[in-house]
Image (cartoon, rainbow, N blue to C red):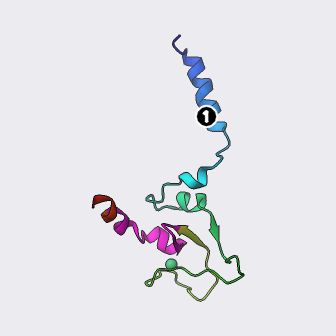
Amino acid sequence: MPLKPEDIQRLLKEELEKPTRGSKSKVDTTIRDYRTWFKLATSMIEEGGEPIKCENPNCQDPRPGDLQVCATINNRLMCRFCFLDGWLLNSENQMRME
Ligand SMILES: [Zn+2]
């Protein structure tokens, strides 16, 4: 039985209202904007209590001495500045083409 327009409307509404469970693992980190950043699991302190450091040798953080909020992308810690700057994006693309 084909869906009626009102059924589609209702399904779309349900889809939008669904809690985004498990969305953190599905974040597309090739889209480097604030919306993506805030979907990522970020941290400032390691499990051992050590402050987390961005792993980019050319870190774009204007205040690298301060505590950094970092997310782990491709097993590398990166701060918001490097994330928005597109760090590791090019190497990811190269790896995909090989
Ligand atoms: Zn950085």
| Quadrant of the image containing the C terminus | bottom left
Residue 16 location, quadrant: top right
Vertically, is 68 above or below 3?
Answer: below
Residue range in magenta is 73-93
Please check the rendered image and state whether residue 92 is part of the magenta-colored stretch, yes or no: yes
Residue 26 is situated, as x and y percent measured from the top left of the image, at 54, 51
Displayed quadrant of residue 34: bottom right
Q: In the rendered image of this protein, does residue 14 appear above or below residue 63?
A: above
- The front one of 64 and 78 is 78
Q: How far across and down, in percent of the image, does residue 55 sit?
A: 50, 80
- How packed mark 1 is, by other alpha carbons closer than 10 Å (few <14, some 14-19, many 20 or more), is few
| Vertical order, 93 against 81 (above or below) | above
Residue lying furthest bottom in this view? 65
Residue 48, quarter of picture: bottom right
For the residue pair 24 and 58, the one nearer the viewer reads as 24
Q: Is residue 93 left or right of residue 53?
A: left
Residue at image coords 33%, 59%: 96
Residue 9 falls left or right of residue 46: left
Residue lying farthest top? 1
Answer whether residue 31 is magenta in the image: no
Circle 1 sits in a helix, a strand or a loop, which is it?
helix
Residue position marked by numbered label 1 in the rendering: 15
Which residue is at the far right? 49
**In this rendering, would 16 be left or right of 48?**
left
